[in-house]
Amino acid sequence: MSDYIFDNERPIYVQLVEMIRIDIVSGRYKQGEKIPSVRELALKMKVNPNTMQKALSELESEGLIYTERTNGKFVTEDSAQIERIKEKLASDKVASYLDSMKYIGLSYEDALEYLKKAEKK
Amino acid sequence: MSDYIFDNERPIYVQLVEMIRIDIVSGRYKQGEKIPSVRELALKMKVNPNTMQKALSELESEGLIYTERTNGKFVTEDSAQIERIKEKLASDKVASYLDSMKYIGLSYEDALEYLKKAEKK
Amino acid sequence: MSDYIFDNERPIYVQLVEMIRIDIVSGRYKQGEKIPSVRELALKMKVNPNTMQKALSELESEGLIYTERTNGKFVTEDSAQIERIKEKLASDKVASYLDSMKYIGLSYEDALEYLKKAEKK
Amino acid sequence: MSDYIFDNERPIYVQLVEMIRIDIVSGRYKQGEKIPSVRELALKMKVNPNTMQKALSELESEGLIYTERTNGKFVTEDSAQIERIKEKLASDKVASYLDSMKYIGLSYEDALEYLKKAEKK
DNA sequence: GTGGTCTAGACCACT
DNA sequence: GTGGTCTAGACCACG
């Protein structure tokens, strides 16, 4: 259990969803691109193919990928959908950033200030 | 073990340090204020007093608290030191925010944009 | 309790720190050299491993030793740091020498004179 | 046992000898001066008069004080003797200074150097 | 009651 | 075998 990358607290398939989702919205998997087979992905991530299948189903119902029977799975062509998910993720990050700043006693203005200072680095 | 609040991956005393540190920089424990006794805190957090003691020693060597023999432990009067630690924490948060945004394919400018949009909510 | 080497007035771990610190600055433990394991040292000094561990942690935070996980603890490679501590110790010795001379009614010049006379022996 | 000034490891009378000896060689008790009575000294030092008596006997056999029957005890008029003892003490201090410096890996020359540097402070 | 120290003994990850 | 962590339980000085 040395190079194990999954958090024990949450279902593995959820964590796979998060990883692949980010691969898509970040452009590491391009719009319309074929993604590797379930087996291949399962092997790479060292999970059971069923688990990987479940993750991909989630992403499909989310509209980020679609299946071409006998042909494989592809990233959606719907760039607006990708964008929507990306914004959702980004908003989550912002919210969590603001929360953590608030938690240490800093306001929205402080959070903005710190971010601006960070640019110079 | 249902209500256990600690992450198994990191030492409990480190997590205690982080929690109490935030209590101080956020002002939940005020400058100069007496903090509860080691035993009391240990009881509250359900850890061994020695573990709590170790956490508090860390905070003492960090300059956030000081000890009055037989009297208890107190938050430092040195507000500059508290501020220094607070800035350190805030910088870490900013860096991690920027990292996570970059990870989903967004630039510094995007991160700034999203933060500004978040204000209105 | 015949061969007990520790002074009851001060914590054992502090005395261990002092002893090992001197072993390092004096060069008995060389720069970069592996030091014996915690358990070994604890056995040799007849203290509990935890006590020895605490002493070594102190020395680590002082920058005189560092830890290689699963491999052991080593004297720092930073000879400047060793030198800094050595000078600190030496200054303390000088101050205490001058104090004791002053206590028996001798001036700085007397202290210097006595030291020069001592060379010939 | 809060303000107890004696080291448990060595006989109290020996420690009294050392203290009074220093009072004499340092000039706090002047040459030829009458010193307080045994009872008075014993009270002041919170020791049994017998213990103090033993200490003073030691100092007498050392030639630092002498007794005038029915009149009390006095610091010797023999300034050469005082000087001899003082030099003995000073030599001890020098030796212990050099030992401690050697112990941390410093030579006679280093010890001299450090002493010279200390003057400026 | 406060903090501080120490021991004994256990378990863990890593290699 | 290495260091690291944690617990349980004890004792101490101080006031």
Image: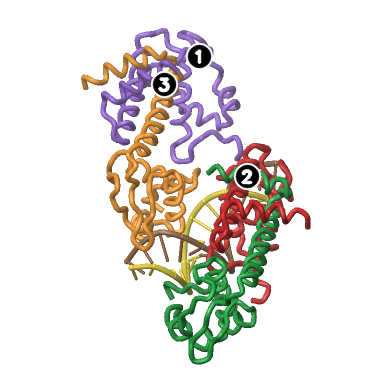
Chain colours: A green, B red, C orange, D purple, E yellow, F brown
What's the amino acid at mark 2?
Lys
The foreground one among D3 and A15 is: A15
Q: Residue F3 occupies which quadrant of the picture?
A: bottom left
Q: Amino acid at mark 3?
A: Leu
x, y (%) of residue A120?
A: 55, 42
The amino acid type found where label 1 is placed reads Arg
Query: Where is A2 relative to B54, above or below?
Result: below
Specify the farthest residue to the bottom.
A70
C57 relative position to B81: left or right: left
Front-lying residue, D56 or C104: C104
Give percent across and percent down for residue A32: 53, 76
> Could you tell me which secondary element the residue under label 1 belongs to?
loop
Which residue is denoted by mark 2 in the rendering? Answer: A116
Mark 2 touching mark 3, by CB under 8 A?
Answer: no
**Vertical position of residue A67 compared to residue C102: above or below:** below
Label placed on residue C37: none
Q: Chain of mark 2?
A: A
